[in-house]
Amino acid sequence: MKTKIFLLTCLAAAFTLKAAAQEISIDKGWKFAIGDSTQWASPTYNDANWKPINLAYDWESQGYPNTDGFGWYRSHLVIPSSLKEKSYLKDSLRITLNNVDDNDEVYLNGQLIAKYGGQKGDIKNGNYGPRSYTIAANNPAILWDKQNVLAIRIFDTGGAGGLYGDKFTLSMADLMDPVSINTDAEFSYGDNNSLNKSIKLVTTSNYAYKGKLAFKVTDPENGTVLYEKTNDADFTAGKPFTYSFSIARLEKKSYVVSYTFTEEKSGKSITKTDGTPYVLTPYPSSKPKINGADVYGARPGNPFLYLIPASGKKPLIYAAQGLPDGLKLDANTGIITGVVTKKGDYPVTLTVKNNLGSNTKKFTIKIGDIIGLTPALGWNSWNAFGLSVNDERVRTAARTMIEKLSAHGWNYVNIDDGWEAEQRAASGEIVTNQKFPDMKATTDYVHSLGLKMGIYSSPGPRTCGGYLGSWQHEDQDAKTYGDWGIDYLKYDWCSYSEVTAKNPTLDDMKKPYQVMRASLDKIPRDIMFSFCQYGMGDVWKWGAEVGGNSWRSTGDIEDTWKSMSTIGFHQIADGPYAQPGHFNDPDMLVVGKVGWGDNQHNSRLTPDEQYTHISLWSLLSSPLLIGCDMGKLDKFTLGLLTNDEVLAIDQDALGKEAHQAIKEADYQVWIKDLADGGKAVGLFNTSDKYQTITLNRDENDLKGLTKIRDVWQQKYIITSGNTYSVKVAPHGVMLMKLSK
Ligand code: GLA
């Protein structure tokens, strides 16, 4: 009884706070149970003994560690008719669940009103993400102004699970819901030194929208409005409104552009903001230059493949002195192949020439037991295409990598989930689905370019996306990967929870990775092994011993500041475990056009947040796996991914990870030791205002490091005295290298 009164008080408090708003928060007063029962949907079911749960956090962190599978959330709440009365359109109620991990069915007073089961409607297949459901306001399931029971059935495929995030609300569907401001077109640079772009107002409803579009450019440093213009804007489903603008090119920083459409009759409006891109990476030189890591590891007796990363005007001619016996270089492509049988460290001198000159670099080939001496640099299909990856998209990624990125060391082309069939061959062999007609041919193509090929699987019966996993077929799958020529395996935990102990011990957690490790060891190939179990059991403490080249230290990343910064700035406990051949993996990059499916959008990170993302991940010695549609790389994204001095921080041969040296409310300083005795330093502004950050070289072991280089701009900075102050943009970074 007591509990009940308490619950009602909480609800009343939550409601009065937001009552004036057009939406009410429903993030309080939830109860939770692990398991599954049809009765739990019922409004009369007695959930008095269920435990309260907080929707700000996943269920793992609230007393249900390592729990995958079904869980139910229940809430008793009043749905006020004032919500409907105050709304402009009164026809549907909207429930926003931000986010669901992974799939859900929503019951209102016992009736199923919405469900999300990603793949084929099955609650067990699908993905983490936000949900927004609408139901007709006259649906009898809604009890206006009375107690309602909202019951949500969740299925978690693996890792963190439940309802957790920053927005759980009830609101009425709005006139602006079907409207979006599409800002995905690229900013282009005009001849007259201008920055140009077109945006579109689009709708999916039948309504004819008539109103004004306000366009504004603001300098975030001082709030000055640089441009402001309002235009009439009318559009319908068949006829979007396009607005093109041209602004004089601005200095090297990001300005805030806002677009607000206000509908005439209702007064309703919708706003979207954009950041102007600015490229810091110097314009690529035509002179020949060898880039990439200083070391490369391979195992004796296995096929060797290394593409010398070199930039400069083509054609380039390559040479190598001191290659170990068994290797040969193709002087026209820069591809080194062969097999080395003898273990050892082989110092090599690489040379690249073109008609403008030549460049040499000292390089060490280490033939031994450890591969992946520096973090992998490549592309992975997931953040771009999700389960809709296909052969053509992978080939486009490979082609683009060769045209635009491999000169800087990028070399893995990794297929994530979505390539597998739903049933094995009669022999038990894994087969591809129809999107990948011939995996061997695709791999041969990738190899012919000098690049490497990666694939994905799960130790459970199914992958996170519901495709076939490797459970009880590990040897067979490793052999198939070997036959295809796979060079990298990402191995996800999903659905393994169904075949292991309910509360897995550390040994249970290690087991599937040990089993696959043993299977991969039987294959005469160097296959990078990437664990993906989201950091369970402090994987960084045992990932190397179990034979992982990298291990995910977090849940899945999203293209938001909240997600990227929470992940990036929390890589602290795992930091000391990074070492050559074994790295923490804070998940893949979210720059460029991302989308996790068929539709891609520009990363929702601002340009400054994207500089932070790449800088921080490089300081963290993270594998850098580009997660965008490679067919649509824009100039800004290319600048982010082709800065050799930034990449050199990630690829540093010492293999250490940066540590958080200073953490203040508004800024952080991260420092990474480098092989040459220098240090890479990131000054991160974590606030949403411009800030001056000061670095004191008498502190944090920086004494004696007199030279400061602005790594993004590749310029030395003139300083005097031991403190150096710099203005940093909101959520932005100043990345530096300090040396003697
Ligand atoms: C998990 C992983 C993702 C991706 C998907 C594929 O969510 O964390 O990186 O591999 O599975 O289904």
Image: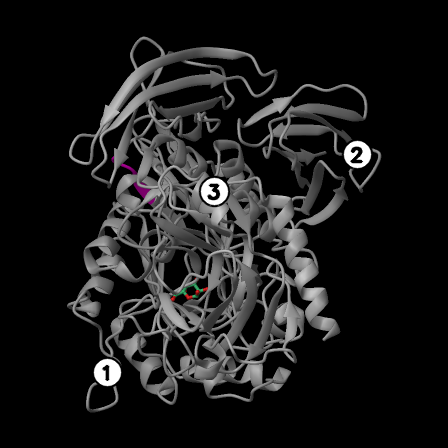
Residue behind mark 3: 361
Residue behind mark 2: 704
The colouring scheme, among rainbow, by chain, secondary structure or one colour, is one colour
Within 10 Å of disc 3 (Cα), the crowding (few <14, some 14-19, many 20+) is some
Looking at the image, residue 374 lies above or below residue 287: below
Residue 576 shows up from this direction: no
At label 1, the amino acid type is Gln
Of the two numbered discs 2 and 1 in the rendering, the one whose residue sits closer to the viewer: 1
Q: Main secondary structure of the magenta part?
A: loop
Looking at the image, residue 450 lies above or below residue 638: below
- What numbered label is drawn on residue 437? none
Residue 233 position, x and y percent, is 28, 21
At label 3, the amino acid type is Lys
Looking at the image, residue 263 lies above or below residue 123: above
Q: Nearer the viewer, residue 495 or 69?
A: 69
Q: Nearer the viewer, residue 265 or 387?
A: 265
Q: Is residue 449 left or right of residue 299?
A: left
Q: On the rendering, which quadrant does ligand 1 occupy?
A: bottom left
Residue 727 position, x and y percent, is 66, 23
Q: Is residue 332 left or right of residue 365?
A: left
Q: Is residue 65 magenta?
A: no
Within 10 Å of disc 1 (Cα), the crowding (few <14, some 14-19, many 20+) is some
Are the residues flagged by discs 2 and 1 in contact, CB closer than 8 Å? no
Residue numbers of the magenta segment: 314-318
Badge 1 marks a residue whose secondary structure is loop
At label 2, the amino acid type is Gly
Of the two numbered discs 3 and 2 in the rendering, the one whose residue sits closer to the viewer: 2
Residue 442 shows up from this direction: yes
Say which quadrant the C terminus sits in: top right
- Whole-angstrom CA distance, mark 2 to mark 1, is 62 Å
- What numbered label is drawn on residue 423? 1
At x 53%, y 32%, the residue is 608
